[in-house]
């Protein structure tokens, strides 16, 4: 107890900001408030006021305290510098620098705190506390993992980690800078075991071969480190992303491209690689190896890159020149003016950021060799500060929140580029600032997207994309077009079929769930657009594309070849990531009934009978509108159900309305099913012994009104609950309770020959197939001679009836809040009625052929799931309805189904293998047969 108390105190102490950082407290509050989705205008207004109230109440005062405390700390450490030994001076100097930075930051925050009235984040954004450390988080903040993390320092240690993973059945993935925005470096869990993330930062050796103009570098090396060393030899990189903060290993896995239109992507400048493969062997792979294309752009799925030999180029003096080119004329300009000029070393096409004219015009930017000067060593080359410059951070933060600022920035940048003749070196050009964009916010981030388009369709695609971005109010921070040469080396090439123009987007993204969904939808639309234009999209960003889009964009045959090679090289799946799980790993071929339901108006109209007449919990038009929207950004049954579960309450009545519907329908269900039972047993007047399976005696009262019920009454269900009284009244209507486990439905405690009637309105389809023998044997044992077994189950005799039965269950579960885990594990052994009749006959329960029942099927009016009541008799069959005269029936074959007037059916979950009791105002009510 004392230990736990001390631990809590320690955790509380760790949450208190350090000296000079107290303003982080309200800043963190304000940031987290922006994670909440807008639920109503009033809630949004309350949040608007609350953020400003918190800011004004705490921020100015705490920044003032931070100024005083940081100034005092800086002064104290400065004195330490004066009177300390040489060894200690470095420490004190570092402390002085840290507290001086905090002082100036707090001073500026205090002075400009009045701007917080306009938007608190204009100021508080710079004071958000650092995120809590976790094993891995994607660059855009969307994906996280708490798996194991290892940091090997040698090849042997790396091998030991992979060996351990192989032995334990774990997956591993390597990470470099950890800035990729997709799931490709996030190891997947297997069989409940967390994956291992391998931090490659210690693999940072750099060896330059000046004569060959190559560099052999460790996978953990960042481009900026290689630039710094190469610059000393008057060399520079050929291919690199627009920014130099990424690692070599990560760039190899995603096969990046850059501004050098002559070199193409990274695969073209890699001479050889060393990897640790799935067999835990060190393997050298050159450009002529079949495996080379599996590593370049293979997302780390064929091994961990240890090192690479990379081609370099001369570090030259180049002039930056801008040319005003229209979108329609750009490709022609590039082909005639850029590709034909060997002096143009790098090129890109900067696009408009003006929200009123997004991507509407551009400036073609060339970096041109204009003299015969020799390669040079760049004098002022340095690593950008961890957070960039303060001015960069301020400008980016204002641009995030103001379209007007983005417009003015673009106008200024366009003017600068068109009037620029600045001489720069290759290494200077390839060091654009980016760190000012990184931040600690949990409520927003900067995301990237990229599309590869054939030249002949580029203008049309950009115009369509402009319209899409404008409609979705995307806060575009940067956008450009780059040329990418045809790539036949990498297996999953984004330029396999010819030269492509890459349209690159960087935009501010809210991390609210609904805003992420909005972005996912427009990205999918953009993916469809680029595929229609003969191009594809860049896979390493957010995994928003569907499997169909992935296979269409990258080629179904190429994807299949990649998957086959992966299975051959790594049969145990040692290298497995979130990306590979999403796109590469084979999935069970299961029907997606949600998509099948929405595939045609005819199917939707038929299922509306269930929504209107059976479920009665949600308006069909609202439901279909919601499901149609969900299908725009979800693909699998799991994804669709999870989102339906989250969003369905938005289109359902409130608690009071739901309660009224449920209570108003309960008596109708009892009346209807009892009427059906009466119709199927017209000769039965007295029931000596009644067993109700699946319910707490819900139908006992109605049975007593229709029949003379004597003898013991047994309720077989999961467990007694206070809500039973709402279903049955008080006191409980049964004499004996028997616990029901749907996995092992055991009726052995009920005596032989003790019941005239057993009802099973929950159906047999929820019981495991291997349990049916003992269950039905017990049913026959319990029944007296000529006793009746009343079964309600779906007549799933074809694809459509199977679809309707499955959808009835899934929608029923979603309306009642049944978890995704339970939905996916639910036993649904749907069969035709012919199957059930044959099975029950096998266990001595045949149709009641001697009775004279109604010449109709016991299906509720409008129920497309064909949930049918059938009577079986012990020991000899007796025909009670036409159910026994034909193998299957269509609705057209039936007379009007037998049902009570104003029949309704509604439900709340009765707990079975995957049905959970839901805490609502109403009782646990389950639709018979569901």
Image (cartoon, grey):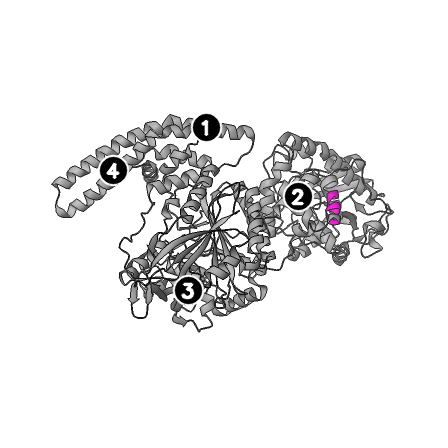
Camera-side residue of 645 and 404: 404
Q: Which of marks 3 and 4 is in front?
A: 3
Label 3 SS:
loop
Q: Disc 3 versus disc 1: distance between alpha carbons?
A: 59 Å
Q: Position of residue 831 (x, y in %)?
A: 72, 55
Q: Where is residue 89 in the image (x, y as percent from the top left)?
A: 16, 45
Give the side of residue 513 with respect to residue 5, left or right: right
Label annotation for residue 620: none
Q: Earlier in the sequence, mark 3 or mark 4?
A: 4
Q: What stretch is highlighted in magenta?
A: 602-609
Quickly name the residue at label 2. Answer: 812
Assess disc 4: are there few (<14), some (14-19) or many (≥20) residues with their C-alpha within 10 Å of its C-alpha: many
Figure check: 848 above or below 256: above
Figure check: 39 above or below 829: above
Q: Which of marks 2 and 4 is nearer the N terminus?
A: 4
Camera-side residue of 877 and 245: 245
In percent of the image, x 84 and y 50: which residue is there?
892
Quickly name the residue at label 1. Answer: 50
Label 4 SS:
helix
Give the side of residue 66 with respect to residue 88, left or right: right
Q: Position of residue 9 (x, y in %)?
A: 32, 36
Q: Earlier in the sequence, mark 2 or mark 1?
A: 1
Figure check: 630 above or below 454: above
Q: Disc 3 versus disc 4: distance between alpha carbons?
A: 50 Å
Q: Quadrant of the N terminus?
A: top left
Label 2 SS:
helix
Quickly name the residue at label 3. Answer: 342
In percent of the image, x 31 and y 47: which residue is there?
385
Label annotation for residue 100: 4
Q: Where is residue 120 in the image (x, y as percent from the top left)?
A: 42, 32
Q: Disc 2 versus disc 4: distance between alpha carbons?
A: 62 Å
């Amino acid at each position: 107890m004392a230990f736990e108390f001390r631990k809590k105190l320690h955790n509380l102490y760790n949450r208190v900001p350090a000296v000079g950082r107290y303003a982080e407290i309200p800043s963190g509050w304000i940031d987290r408030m922006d994670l909440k989705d807008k639920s109503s205008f009033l809630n949004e207004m309350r949040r608007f006021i609350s953020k400003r109230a918190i800011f004004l109440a705490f921020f100015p005062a705490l920044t003032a305290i931070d100024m005083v405390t940081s100034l005092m700390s800086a002064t104290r450490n400065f004195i330490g510098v004066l009177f300390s030994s040489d060894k200690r001076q470095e420490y004190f100097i570092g402390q002085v620098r840290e507290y001086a930075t905090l002082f100036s930051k707090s001073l500026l925050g205090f002075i400009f705190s009045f701007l917080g009235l306009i938007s608190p984040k204009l100021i508080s954004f710079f004071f958000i506390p650092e995120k809590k450390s976790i094993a891995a988080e994607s660059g855009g903040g969307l994906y996280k993992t708490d798996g194991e993390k290892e940091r090997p320092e040698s090849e042997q240690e790396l091998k030991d980690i992979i060996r351990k993973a192989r032995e334990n059945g774990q997956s591993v993935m390597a990470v470099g800078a950890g800035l990729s925005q997709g799931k490709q470096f996030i190891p997947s869990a297997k069989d409940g075991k967390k994956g291992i993330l391998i931090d490659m930062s210690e693999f940072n050796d750099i060896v330059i071969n000046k004569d060959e103009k190559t560099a052999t570098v460790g996978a953990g090396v960042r481009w900026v480190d290689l630039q710094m060393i190469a610059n000393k030899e008057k060399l520079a990189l050929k291919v690199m992303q627009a920014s130099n903060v990424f690692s070599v290993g990560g760039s190899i896995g995603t096969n990046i491209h850059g501004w050098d239109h002559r070199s193409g992507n990274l695969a073209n400048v890699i001479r050889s690689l060393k990897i640790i493969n799935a067999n835990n062997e060190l393997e050298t792979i050159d450009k002529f190896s079949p495996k080379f294309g599996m590593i370049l752009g293979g997302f780390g799925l064929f091994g961990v890159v240890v090192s690479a030999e990379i081609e370099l180029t001369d570090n030259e003096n180049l002039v930056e020149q801008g040319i005003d080119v229209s979108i329609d004329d750009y490709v022609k300009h590039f082909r005639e003016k850029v590709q034909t000029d060997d002096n143009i070393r790098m090129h890109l096409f900067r696009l408009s950021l003006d929200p009123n004219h997004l991507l509407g015009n551009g400036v073609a930017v060339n970096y041109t060799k204009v003299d015969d000067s020799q390669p040079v060593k760049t004098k002022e080359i340095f690593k950008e500060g961890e957070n960039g410059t303060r001015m960069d951070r301020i400008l980016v933060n204002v641009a995030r929140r103001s379209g007007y600022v983005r417009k003015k920035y673009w106008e200024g940048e366009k003017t600068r580029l068109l009037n620029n003749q600045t001489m720069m070196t290759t290494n200077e050009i390839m060091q654009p600032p980016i760190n000012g964009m990184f931040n600690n916010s949990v409520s927003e981030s900067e995301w990237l997207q990229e599309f590869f388009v054939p030249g002949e369709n580029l203008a049309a695609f950009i115009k369509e994309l402009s319209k899409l971005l404008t409609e979705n109010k995307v806060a575009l921070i940067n956008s450009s077009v780059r040329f990418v040469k045809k790539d036949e080396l990498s297996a999953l090439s984004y330029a396999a079929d010819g030269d492509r123009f890459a349209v690159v987007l960087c935009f501010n993204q809210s991390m609210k769930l609904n805003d992420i969904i909005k972005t996912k939808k427009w990205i999918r639309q953009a993916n469809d657009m680029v595929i229609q234009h003969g191009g594809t999209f860049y896979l390493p960003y957010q995994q928003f594309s569907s499997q169909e889009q992935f296979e269409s964009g990258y080629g179904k045959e190429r994807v299949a070849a990649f998957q086959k090679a992966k299975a051959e090289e790594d049969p145990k799946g040692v290298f497995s990531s979130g990306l590979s799980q999403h796109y590469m790993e084979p999935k069970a071929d299961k029907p997606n009934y949600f998509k099948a339901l929405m595939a045609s108006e005819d199917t939707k109209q038929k299922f509306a009978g269930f929504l209107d007449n059976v479920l009665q919990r949600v308006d069909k038009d609202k439901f279909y509108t919601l499901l149609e929207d969900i299908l725009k950004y979800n693909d699998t049954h799991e994804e669709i159900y999870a989102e339906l579960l989250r969003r369905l309450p938005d289109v359902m009545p409130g608690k009071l309305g739901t309660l009224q519907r449920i209570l108003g329908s309960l008596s109708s269900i009892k009346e209807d099913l009892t009427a059906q039972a009466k119709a199927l047993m017209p000769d039965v007047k007295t029931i000596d012994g009644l067993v109700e399976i699946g319910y707490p005696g819900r139908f006992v009262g109605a049975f007593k009104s229709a029949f003379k019920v004597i003898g013991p009454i047994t309720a077989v269900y999961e467990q007694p609950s206070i809500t039973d009284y709402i279903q049955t009244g008080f006191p409980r209507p049964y004499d004996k309770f028997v616990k029901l486990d749907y996995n092992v439905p055991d009726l052995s405690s009920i005596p032989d020959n003790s019941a005239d009637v057993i009802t099973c309105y929950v159906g047999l389809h929820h019981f495991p197939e291997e349990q049916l023998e003992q269950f039905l044997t017990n049913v026959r044992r319990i029944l007296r001679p000529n006793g009746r077994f009343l079964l309600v189950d779906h007549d799933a005799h074809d694809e459509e009836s199977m679809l309707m039965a499955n959808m009835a269950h899934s929608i029923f579960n979603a309306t009642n809040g049944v978890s995704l885990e339970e939905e996916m594990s639910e036993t649904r052994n749907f069969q035709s009625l012919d199957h059930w009749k044959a099975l029950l006959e096998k266990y001595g329960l045949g149709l009641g052929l001697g009775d004279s029942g109604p010449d109709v099927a016991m299906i509720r009016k409008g129920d497309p799931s064909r949930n049918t009541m059938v009577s079986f008799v012990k020991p000899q069959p007796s025909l009670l309805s036409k159910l026994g005269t034909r193998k299957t029936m269509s609705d057209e074959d039936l007379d009007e189904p037998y049902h009570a007037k104003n029949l309704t059916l509604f439900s709340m979950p009765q707990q079975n293998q995957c049905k959970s009791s839901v805490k609502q105002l109403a009782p646990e009510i389950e639709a018979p047969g569901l």
